[in-house]
Image (tube, grey):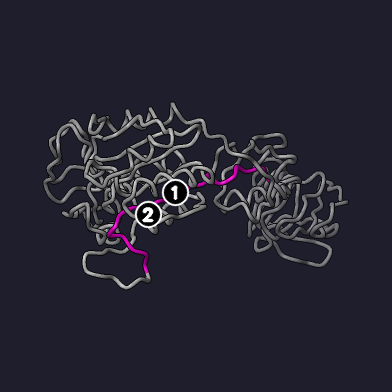
Amino acid sequence: MKFFKTVSLDMAFNEILDKNRIVLKTEKIEIENSLGRVLAEDIYSELDLPSFNRSTVDGYAVKVKDVFGASDFSPVPLNLKGTVVMGQKSEHILESGSCVYIPTGGMLPEGADGVVMIEDCEFLGDEILINKGISNYSNLILKGSEIQKNQKIISKGERITSGHIGVLASIGRKEIEIFEKIKFSIISTGDEVVSIGSTLKIGEVYDINTHIFSSLIEEGAGEVVHKFLVKDSLELLSKNLKDALEKSHVVLISGGSSVGMKDFTEKAIESIGGEIFIHGMAIKPGKPTIVATYKDKFIFGMPGHPQSGVNVFRVLVEKIFLNRHRTVVLGKLTENLYGDPGKTCFVNVSLLYTEDGIKVQPFQSKSSMIRPVLDACGFISIPDHREGLYAGEIVEVILNGK
């Protein structure tokens, strides 16, 4: 039996990466449907942004040298030669001693190199008094100053955000090529596990892990294609596992990864021809974790306790297959924490915002408990080479939220 020839978290991470042969298909979609999807191409701009020199204020386009030294006490008079019309190319050619009215966003007339704000001017019919001098290119955004034509602006592999969509719209990009969502199936096992909505009998528990794993997958922009609830039966588990592998890239089996009499995950994987390469990880909670391959697919035997399963998902599954990187904040630990040398230990924490900075308050809980998953703001890790952490140490908190 291969159980508990434990490997470190780093070793497990690298082994999975090395064996990862999953190839995702690509498709073209319109940008309004792309939020959260992963880009499958580099994006290059087909135009300059802005595509013309434009004003950032309402005012008068001028030759800067004409208004040098202008002030309330010594205004400079300029002849008003016309108005820039929004959305149209400016046909005016500015000559020395003249100006053109320009609205915010309007196209700068040829010959102008600055805009004086309207509040620094006086309107006298065909003449404008300039009461303030400006420097070259004041109150302008120059052509190509944000984005230049043929410049790469978004890289393949980036997850599309609202900011990406705004930039794509600004360069007129209607469609982009994205990767298909990675597909997951979830199998929850156990004679005691029943579907939510059922009447709970003594000795039974509701199926937590299917729902929490589904939520974590959706948060990471993956897709859950099938869910199975299976009693403790090697035959049933093997059948459902094979069905799941036909539909998905990754299968999560919740429960049954330890070595009890009814822990069938290892046997089920082997019975269908899967190759187990990890059975036992030097982490806490989450030690009885199985990782296997079947052709180019992956199978994870996840611990049945909710906190253990969530822990393994966050530190392993989502980082590799969903390319999700959570937000990290720094804070000061409020109390001593004991670790378990040789294991990487994870502890749920809450954050206290004080005048002295962020305080990190650990939750003391068992891996079978679900409430800390709700109450905690995030989690910290105690490295495998440390016996613990001291009160007052600055620690990294990996936040639970998006």
Q: CA distance from mark 2 to mark 1?
A: 8 Å
Q: Give the x, y percent position of residue 274.
A: 42, 33
Name the amino acid type tagged 2. Val
Highlighted magenta segment, given as a residue range? 176-196
Question: Could you say where residue 242 lies in the image, as x and y percent from the top left?
Answer: 47, 43
Magenta span dominant secondary structure: strand
- Looking at the image, do the residues carrying marks 2 and 1 touch, with CB atoms under 8 Å apart? yes
Q: Quadrant of residue 148?
A: top right
Return the mark for residue 240. Answer: 1
Vertical order, 206 against 90 (above or below): below
Q: Is residue 184 magenta?
A: yes
Number of the label disc, if any, that sits on residue 230: 2
**Left or right: 149 with respect to 301?**
right
| Residue 141 as seen in the image, left or right of residue 346 | right
Q: Is residue 353 visible?
A: no
Q: Amino acid at mark 1?
A: Asn
Q: Secondary structure at mark 2?
A: strand
Q: Is residue 73 visible?
A: yes
